[in-house]
Image: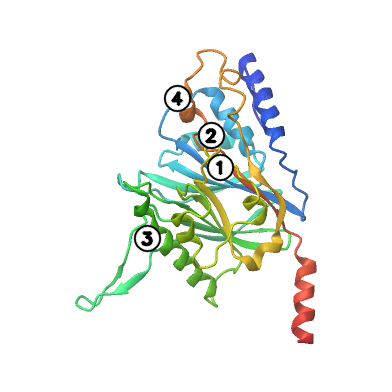
Amino acid sequence: MFHGNLDADTAAGLKELRKRIDDAHIPPSVLDKSITIATWNIREFGRRKRRRESYHYIAEILNQFDLIAIVELRRNLSQLRKVMDILGPYWDVVYSDYTPDYGGNWERFAYLFNKRAVTFTGLAAELDPPRKKNRITKEYEAQFSWWRSPFLASFRSGNFDFVVISAHIRWGDKNADRIKPLELLAQTIDKRRRDSYGTDKDIILMGDFNIPAIGDPLYEAITHKGLKMPEALAKTDLGSNLKKDKRYDQILHYPSESKCFTDNAGVLDFYTGGIKKLYPNDTPDKKAFTYELSDHLPLWIEVDVDTEEEKLDQIIGRNRG
């Protein structure tokens, strides 16, 4: 980390934040053995002006993980660059283009990753909605718009090659507005997984799905094609909003990849303990605070990337079967 010259209040704020980070019990990564991945909706990241200390706090939080899917990154990348400067040269980023209208909120996605633990393997693209041939025009036309196209990228850590897909499902006027985009997202990912020419079958879906709870019709919509929450996350009742009572953010996968997830998972709660300890001078109220850090907490899980034993078992099983 390259925090540089800090004033006393920011230094004290970082010490307080580190106490809250310690309470999250995030295990350190082990080279070629394990990594931690996370998804974090950083509220209007790049749109509203933030205080200088907020960039240091955001960087400190991101530094706890090895790969982070950033949701709600705006078209202005200056704030991302400030955070990257603090994180230092071991960090890199892959980001999407922004959606240039109010429907897409001028948002883009990004994957920040620690190059000492994770390697970007070349694939980065927006996930296109399903298309159908128009009988009259003979053109292939999109059947639906996600408003903000999900973003996918391929990575490798240890022996584990995987594709991460991030999404930000629009809020809409009512919950039912989210069912169709969630169903189509699940169907599109399932079709991709079954494609013999797909880059990788190990797919992890992350992001802000605006799903209030497990078992909700919205959760059923995104999981109806077999996507599943890792057991370590399913065991916890913690939400990713500041009250920790809503499951807006998700990390999902297919059961065939379940061996890669460990028993370590949770949220990093940077909010409990109060705002004043982080911003002692001119303390923001709760709403203003969400524009400094966020109204979402990072959701994280540990991944076992040492898959050599499993691959050997698969070879033995195929040859003896």
Q: Residue at x 67, y 39 (%)?
A: 64
- Near mark 1 (Cα within 10 A), the count class, few <14, some 14-19 or many ≥20, is many
Spatial CA distance of label 4 from label 2 is: 16 Å
Residue holding disc 4: 288
Where does residue 269 sit, x and y in percent of width and height?
A: 61, 34
Establish if 12 lies above or below 217: above
- Near mark 3 (Cα within 10 A), the count class, few <14, some 14-19 or many ≥20, is some
Lower sequence index among marks 4 and 2: 2
**What type is the residue that disc 2 sits on?**
Lys
Name the mark nearer the viewer: 4 or 2.
2
Horizontal relation, residue 81 to residue 321: left or right: left
SS class, disc 3: helix
**What type is the residue that disc 4 sits on?**
Ala
Q: Give the position of the N terminus as an image quadrant.
A: top right
**What type is the residue that disc 1 sits on?**
Gly
Lower sequence index among marks 3 and 2: 3
Residue holding disc 2: 243
Residue holding disc 3: 180
